[in-house]
Amino acid sequence: MGNHMIAVIGAGKLGELVLSGLLRAGWPANQLIATTRRPERAAELAERYGIRPTLNLTAVTQADVLLVAVKPQDAGKLLDEFGMKIPPGKLVVSLCAGLPTSFFTERLPGGIPVVRVMTNTPALVDQAMTVISAGPYATDEHLALTEEIFQPLGKTMRVPEAQQDAVTALSGSGPAYFYLLVEAMIDAGILLGLPRQVAHELIVQTAIGSAVMLRDSGEHPVKLREAVTSPAGTTISAIRELEKHGVRAALLAALEAARDRAREIAAQSA
Ligand SMILES: NC(=O)C1=CN([C@@H]2O[C@H](COP(=O)(O)OP(=O)(O)OC[C@H]3O[C@@H](n4cnc5c(N)ncnc54)[C@H](OP(=O)(O)O)[C@@H]3O)[C@@H](O)[C@H]2O)C=CC1
Ligand SMILES: O=C(O)[C@@H]1CCC=N1
């Protein structure tokens, strides 16, 4: 972790997840800075994590890595405030959905490297999927530093920036899709007469077991599903209904809509 000073600019839900992950990974609290809009939010973070809340301008002067975690819609106003005052030698890492790195470079002095990152909320349990792309002026060294920061929070991967809107649709928003499925299956348990707590425990453990098998067995998901699906059995009856109701087509359309929304956010922010 070296001597880097990291600032989370806009420590809301995602920024807090990252801060807490960095602390768990052993980053000293005195190498972490957080900024927020509301003073009460800053006080909450200082009390919870012992990190230093400060003003944006102070943060960008003191820290050498600036993790921008405001809503994409707030990024333009934020950069109007201090973008052009960022001194040389800093690394800007955007965690904002949709915004291309060019959005940042247009609002920063020339030569400031920008890295685009899409992570996700399982960072809270060190199981994030963090996807990293180099923007203008970002070298391999900047990507490696970004990986060093996010590695303890889960898995990291590098992709070309052109893939980041699709990545956002898959892994950025992905946890929400799984939670929705789990929620619906628990409700199905209620429909079938199980107590809510029982249904909850059955489905959550089944989700965990299935996820670990997907990760560790090395098998394709089709093979794993086939192994559960007995001839004339129960599973195929359920699958017929899922297909009849277009779950597969719904997922294709849903992820395409998320990708399109990322593009729209960029167009609206330009
Ligand atoms: N939530 C998620 O699962 C994921 C989110 N993202 C991206 O992360 C970013 C943040 O999302 P999320 O955490 O959900 O949003 P939040 O609204 O929870 O957090 C945004 C934070 O930015 C702060 N903020 C806004 N303007 C300023 C400013 N000018 N100066 C300092 N702080 C400011 C807000 O401060 P205050 O609280 O005081 O208003 C708030 O704490 C978005 O760009 C989103 O696309 C990416 C991947 C996953
Ligand atoms: O919904 C959003 O826009 C953010 C980006 C990915 C997950 N949450």
Image (tube, helix red, strand yellow):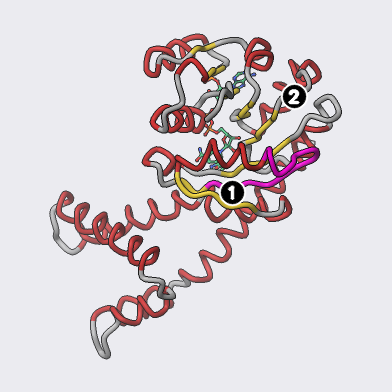
Q: Secondary structure at mark 2?
A: loop
Place of residue 170 in the rendered image (x, y in percent of width and height, measured from the top left): 55, 56
Q: Is mark 2 within 8 Å of ligand 1?
A: no
Quickly name the residue at label 2: 89
Residue 83 is left or right of residue 31, and the answer is right
Q: Position of residue 99 (x, y in %)?
A: 71, 40
Q: In the rendering, at what x and y percent does residue 195 appear? A: 13, 53
Q: Which residues are magenta?
A: 130-142
Residue at image x 43%, y 72%?
245
Indicate the position of residue 49 as horizontal and vertical percent values.
40, 18
168 above or below 237?
Answer: above
Q: Is residue 158 magenta?
A: no
Q: Residue at x 16, y 49 (%)?
A: 197
Distance from the alpha carbon under mark 1 to that under mark 2: 23 Å
What's the residue at 30%, 57% (across, down)?
A: 208
Mark 1 lies on a secondary structure that is strand
Q: Which residue is mark 1?
A: 131
Q: Quadrant of ligand 1?
A: top right
Residue 106 or 74: which is nearer the viewer? Answer: 106
Q: In the rendered image of this protein, does residue 210 appear above or below residue 132?
A: below
